[in-house]
Image: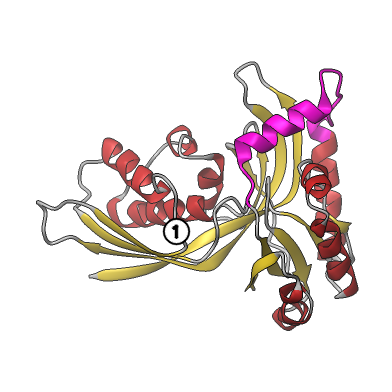
Amino acid sequence: MEITLSCPVKLNLTLRVLSRRPDGYHELYSLFWKKYSDERLTISQNCDEIMGDSLDVSGTEIDGENLVTKALAAARRSFGGIPALKMKLDKIFPAGSGIGAGSGNAAALLSWLADNYALSLSAGEIGKLGADVSFLAQKYEMAEARGIGEILEPVGAALPLCWLLAFPSWSSNTKEAYSALDEMRGRDYAPMTPMEAASEARNCVKTLAGGGRSGLLPNDFYPLLAERHGEYKTAEKIAEESGAAGWGLCGSGSAFFALYADIEAAERAGSERFAREKWIIKTHYLE
């Protein structure tokens, strides 16, 4: 039997980097928002047990080890009843865009294994695959994230807004982004408190849920990337002029998002404005 799964992706509706921990990681507060994408993971049992697991990737090229492979290895360490699997992954999103597409591929597999083989990995085990995997493997659509992203608390229903995702010709490396942020801030920087970050995020949600316009949504990485790439200011202007309710940077970059009341408005803004920008290599829409 063959099954095809839709893989989730995420936005950080807000993202505040609060402090650096002694272990080198960063405490953060973020409001995660999930939608299911057009990336597909197809799974069937591999009849040739000798060959074992296989993963065929088509579409966008992936550098290094795929998170799907890592997730399956972690699952096998915890549960021995999983048969050999034949998998096909259709990739459409570029790496380094900040939407957690690779994490969503892994999350789709883990969710399927949980439903079909009673796989139960701890939050800590899933978190080793990446903080985004922890959120994307959950059932809820929105959550507050604390710690290094592994402490999750579901929030209310997702906002009734559509996403426009604009992918630029450059990517963003998460580790390098955090290093650059630390360097920019220096030793004497006083970050927001967790309470302040949470209050800010809830005010943004309240505005958007009430049909208001939030404008540029808070993300501590945005000033860094906007300084390097002036094109983001152009994206802001397009989002504002095309009637977006809110806009900002996806995670630590590099994709830009804009939120619209309906899919028609998102597609119109994409085709008439964003797609005409030569620095944007791809636009995508999610209801």
Taking the magenta stretch, the answer to whether it contains residue 182 is: yes
Relative to residue 250, is residue 8 drawn left or right? Answer: left
Relative to residue 26, is residue 67 drawn left or right? Answer: left
Q: Which residues are magenta?
A: 171-195
Residue that protrudes farthest toward the top in the picture = 22
Q: Where 84 falls versus 266 (above or below)?
A: above
Residue 23 on image: x %, y %: 60, 18
Residue 114 on image: x %, y %: 36, 51
Q: Amino acid at mark 1?
A: Glu
Question: Mark 1 highlights which residue?
Answer: 61
Relative to residue 18, is residue 123 drawn left or right? Answer: left
Query: As rendered, which of 11 and 279 lies closer to the eye?
Result: 279
Q: Quadrant of residue 29?
A: top right
Query: As rendered, which of 55 and 213 lies closer to the eye?
Result: 55
| Residue at 75 percent of width and 71 percent of height | 277
Secondary element at tag 1: loop
Residue 201 in view in this figure: yes
Q: Quadrant of the N terminus?
A: bottom left
Query: As rendered, which of 216 and 270 lies closer to the eye?
Result: 270
| Residue at 11 percent of width and 58 percent of height | 48
Q: Quadrant of residue 150?
A: top right
Residue 246 on image: x %, y %: 82, 62
